[in-house]
Image: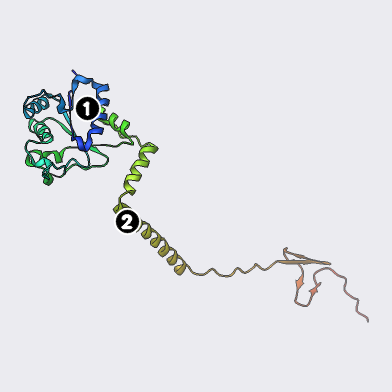
Amino acid sequence: MALKVFISYRRDDSAGYAGRVHDRLQQEFGRDFLFMDVDSIPLGANFAKVLGEEVAKCDVLLAMIGPGWLDAHDENGNRRLENANDFVRIEVGAALKRGIPVIPILLEGTQVPKASQLPDDLKELALRNGLDVRHASFAEDMQRLIRRLKGAPQQPASVTPRRLHTLAWNFLSKDKNRAVLGWVGAGVVAVIGALWAAFVYFTPPSKPHSPAAAGVAASCGSVAVGGSATSTTITAGGVTGADCGAPKPKSTP
């Protein structure tokens, strides 16, 4: 039996995304296993009762949460979630009460609301693990959602160049993140400068190189530089040939 999915959303917050999610899941599970819009409630019916019945039939509820989901206000300026008859509160609250899995679909980096920001019957929503869905990575994000809905093991999201660009842009678009990167960069430069100064200060200067004395060798009738001197004495004034075998002058009687 196919999975039955209930899609909960606010029109002025996430109607476009809800329609895209609905169309993609319809391709996967079929129209009969999706419930999304209160327009499908019969005229004259008690919408709170019908919503409760439809939620009871579903296997999982997707709570589409965009930037305006939490603080949406009615025409009187009151926060809609504070109204017990708010249909989003009825849908999500009924699923939580019945123990039906509720998956927050977090649009364009929206965070799961904190328990302190929610009415009592929705506080448990703050503990539910959500799924980030973005325009730039919609196809990949929907594949992850479908795998979860089918109960398949969760696979790590592939980091494509497009997704990496999106993540980097989302990170750098926040002033706080840019400030942190600036401080980190300045700290790295300061550390490198300090290490170089310490290296220069504590490294002793190198001693001048003294050329090695050239060996000089001499033989009878010649002098060689770089050889070894044998049987010849070399002095600053010249060379003596005592050992060269030169003939000695005869003494006169």
Who is closer to the viewer here, 153 or 132?
132
> Label for residue 76?
none
Locate residue 219 relative to residue 60 in the image: left or right: right
Q: Residue drawn at (32%, 30%), measured in percent from left and top?
A: 139
**Residue 90 in the image: above or below residue 227:** above
The answer to whether 226 is drawn above or below residue 6 in the figure is below
Q: Amino acid at mark 1?
A: Leu
Is label 2 or label 1 in front? 2
Q: Earlier in the sequence, mark 2 or mark 1?
A: 1
The answer to whether residue 173 is above or below residue 154 is: below
Residue 71 drawn at (x, y percent): 16, 44
Q: Is residue 92 left or right of residue 137?
A: left
Amino acid type of the residue that numbered disc 2 sits on in the rendered structure: Ala
In the image, farthest residue toward the right: 253
Q: Is residue 118 left or right of residue 205?
A: left
Q: Is residue 236 visible?
A: yes
Gap between marks 2 and 1 measured at Cα = 39 Å
- Where is residue 237? Give x, y as percent: 78, 78
Circle 2: is it few (<14), some (14-19), or many (20+) Cα within 10 Å?
few
Q: Secondary structure at mark 2?
A: helix
The quarter of the image holding the N terminus is: top left
Residue most extreme to the top = 1
Residue found at x 23% / y 21%? 29
Residue count near mark 1 (Cα–Cα under 10 Å), binned few <14, some 14–19, many ≥20: some
Q: Quadrant of residue 77?
A: top left
Viewer-proximal residue, 194 or 41?
Answer: 41
The residue that mark 2 highlights is 179
Residue position marked by numbered label 1 in the rendering: 149
Q: Quadrant of residue 31?
A: top left
